[in-house]
Image (tube, grey):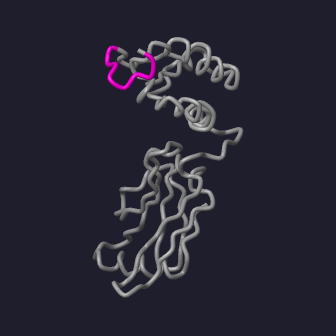
Amino acid sequence: MVNITEPAQGYLTELLEKQNVEDIAVRIFVLDAGTPRAETCISFCRPGEEKPDDEVKQYKDFQAFIDQHSIPFLEEAVVDFQKDSMGGQLTIKAPNSRMPKLTEDSSLEDRVNYILYNEINPGLAAHGGQVTLEEIFEDNVAVLRFGGGCQGCGMVDVTLKDGVEKTLLSQIPQLTEVRDVTDHSIKENAYYQ
């Protein structure tokens, strides 16, 4: 889970006191967790703004609410504060924010993203392409969107059926189908035309 160092706790305590809100806390979460766009965030959390399933961690002078979905992505995360000539800087290092550590309890979405970003996208990157998960429908249907050199590519059907779909269905038995929602009429960046 998240480790907030003593200097960071002191800095956060000062910031919280300046808000003049009784029982104000912090909330820690990861936006776009498990993707290359992941961003770890700390925000003020006024009473009532926490979510019912947040995990609560009590520090000396404040509480931190940890977003439940973000917990696997915050493993080994460190919040630190370093003083410098400009006052100082709060830093958050979350080495697992972009790639979750999968467990038996990991969601279907996390499992799909893990395979896309670790196994499929590195191969597509050679052609300037990538694929992302848009959503998972009922009945465990994964809806994907291709981008870069894959959008409008003449070989995308082969890539989808023989590469992406075969890989996902063989490694995630809960998936029933893989669909592509990309507009392939746009061919400006297509690897094969």
Stretch of the chain drawn in magenta = 185-192
Residue 40 in the image: above or below residue 106: below
Task: Estimate the x, y position of residue 146 in percent, counting from the top left.
Answer: 44, 25
Asked if the stretch drawn in magenta spans residue 189, the answer is yes
Say which residue appears at 55% left-offset and 65% top-offset: 57
Say which residue appears at 36% left-offset and 75% top-offset: 16
Q: Is residue 166 left or right of residue 129?
A: right
Task: Estimate the x, y position of residue 191 in percent, counting from the top left.
Answer: 44, 22
Residue 54 in the image: above or below residue 110: below
In the foreground, 6 or 113: 113
The N terminus - image quarter: bottom right
In the foreground, 50 or 190: 190
Task: Estimate the x, y position of residue 98 in percent, counting from the top left.
Answer: 54, 48
Asked if the stretch drawn in magenta spans residue 142, the answer is no
Q: Magenta: predominant secondary structure element?
A: loop
Tell me where residue 75 sits by quadrant.
Answer: bottom right
Say which residue appears at 55% left-offset and 12% top-offset: 158
Residue 83 in the image: above or below residue 171: below
In the foreground, 169 or 9: 169
Task: Estimate the x, y position of residue 30 in percent, counting from the top left.
Answer: 47, 52
Residue 114 in the image: above or below residue 139: below
For the image shown, how many numbered marks are present on the structure? 0
